[in-house]
Image (tube, rainbow, N blue to C red):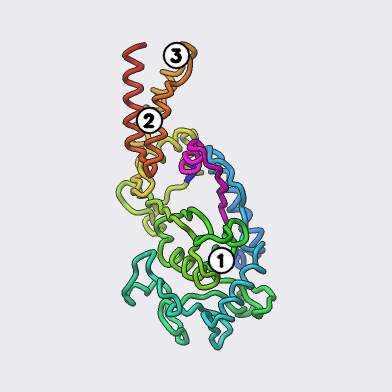
Amino acid sequence: FDLLRRTLELSGYEVMLVRNFTDIDDKIINKALKENKSIQELSSIYIESYTRDLNALNVKKPSLEPKASEYLDAMVCMIETLLEKNIAYRVSNGDIYLDTSKDKDYGSLSVHNSSMEFSRIGLVQEKRLEQDFVLWKSYKGDNDVGFDSPLGKGRPGWHIECSSMVFETLALANTPYQIDIHAGGSDLLFPHHENEACQTRCAFGVEIAKYWMHNGFVNINNEKMSKSLGNSFFIKDALKNYDGEILRNYLLGVHYRSVLNFNEEDLLVSKKRLDKIYRLKQRVLGTLGGINPNFKKEILECMQDDLNVSKALSVLESMLSSTNENW
C-alpha cells in the first residue's frame, strides 16, 4: 500500500496514512507471560523489527502509528455506547459481545450469509448468535492481562481496537464514512474487517470506510505459507541475500490483489530488469534532458487504474527497448 500512497500523492492528493499496531492480543499476551515480559516490551521488539524491514524496502513512514494500548479509553467509550444502545450484551463471565442481529448489513462486506461460515468465530454457550463477536474480555486471573475500567477489569477484543483507533485518529465529521480507504490482507476480510465495519455502523451510524482494499497472499513455490510446512518467508531473511530495492521491485511485480508465488528464479528475473534500468540510466545520464514526460504520464495512468502493475511494467519495458535502440 506504499505504492498506493505514492500514486495518490503523485496524483495531487494530500494523503494521511495511519498504520496501527494491535499490541493487546491473545498471542502477544501468551508469549509475554511465557517470557515474563510486559506486552508493551514484547510488542516493541516486533514493532522495531517490522519497521526495520519496511525501511529496508523504502516504505515511507506513515503519518501516525497508534498502538492499541494507548487508546483504551476510546475503546471503553465505544463499548459503553454500544451497551447503551442495547446492541452489546454481557455474559455471565463478564465478557461483552456485540449482537450482530442488530446490524442489518452484517455480512455485506465479506458476503457471508450462511451460519456455517461463522465457525471461525468460535462457540460460546451464552452468545445469542454464533457470529456475535467479543468487544471486551473480562480478566480471567493470573494467566491473563487486564486493565481497570468502568467496564470492569479486562481487555478489549481485537476488532474494537482498530475501530476505536480509526475514530480517534482519522474519522471525518459529517460524512457517511469515517475514512476514505481501509486496507489490509485478504485474510482480514472476515471476520476482522466485517466486524470492524459492523461495530462502527452500530456505534456511530456511519460506515468506517468508503473503499476497502485487500492484498493477496504470498505463496512459496506454489504452496501457501504455513508454519507446519516450514516454508514461511521473512523479509529479514531475504535481506541477508538481496538488497531491499531488489526485493521491493520483485514484490511490486504482481497486482496487489493477486497471489505472489515467491521463488528465487522470478526474483532473479526481476533483479535483471532492475539492473537493465540502472545500466541504461548510467549510459544515457544527462544526455536525454530528464525523463520523458509522456513516459511519466503513462506510468501514472497505469497506477491510477487500480494499481495496474502489469500494464506499467509493459510501458517500462517498451521505454527500455526504445531507449536502448536509440542509444
Tell me whether circle 2 and circle 3 mark residues in contact (CB < 8 Å): no
Q: CA distance from mark 1 to mark 2?
A: 44 Å
Question: Which residue in the structure is indicated by mark 2?
Answer: 298
Identity of the amino acid at label 3?
A: Leu
Question: Which residue in the structure is indicated by mark 3?
Answer: 288
Question: Which residue in the structure is indicated by mark 1?
Answer: 25
Residue found at the far front of this picture: 174
Query: Is residue 6 located in the magenta-colored stretch of the structure?
Result: yes
What residue is shown at x 34% (from left), y 29% (from top)? 315
Identity of the amino acid at label 2?
A: Glu
What residue is shown at x 46% (from left), y 84% (from top)? 127
Tell me whether circle 1 and circle 3 mark residues in contact (CB < 8 Å): no
**Comes first in the chain, label 2 or label 3:** 3
> Which residues fall within the magenta stretch?
3-21
Local secondary structure at mark 1: loop
What residue is shown at x 46% (from left), y 55% (from top)? 184
Q: Is residue 161 left or right of residue 152?
A: left
User: Disc 2 or disc 3, which is closer to the eye?
Assistant: 2
Q: How far from the left and from the top, in percent, is residue 286?
A: 49, 13
User: Disc 1 or disc 2, which is closer to the eye?
Assistant: 2
Query: Is residue 215 located in the magenta-colored stretch of the structure?
Result: no
> Is residue 15 placed above or below 139 in the rendered structure?
above
**Comes first in the chain, label 1 or label 2:** 1
Identity of the amino acid at label 1?
A: Asp
Q: Is residue 310 left or right of residue 274?
A: left
Q: How far from the left and from the top, in percent, is residue 224?
A: 34, 54
Location of residue 20 (image quadrant): bottom right
- For the residue pair 134 and 55, the one nearer the viewer reads as 134
**Comes first in the chain, label 1 or label 3:** 1
Location of residue 325 (image quadrant): top left
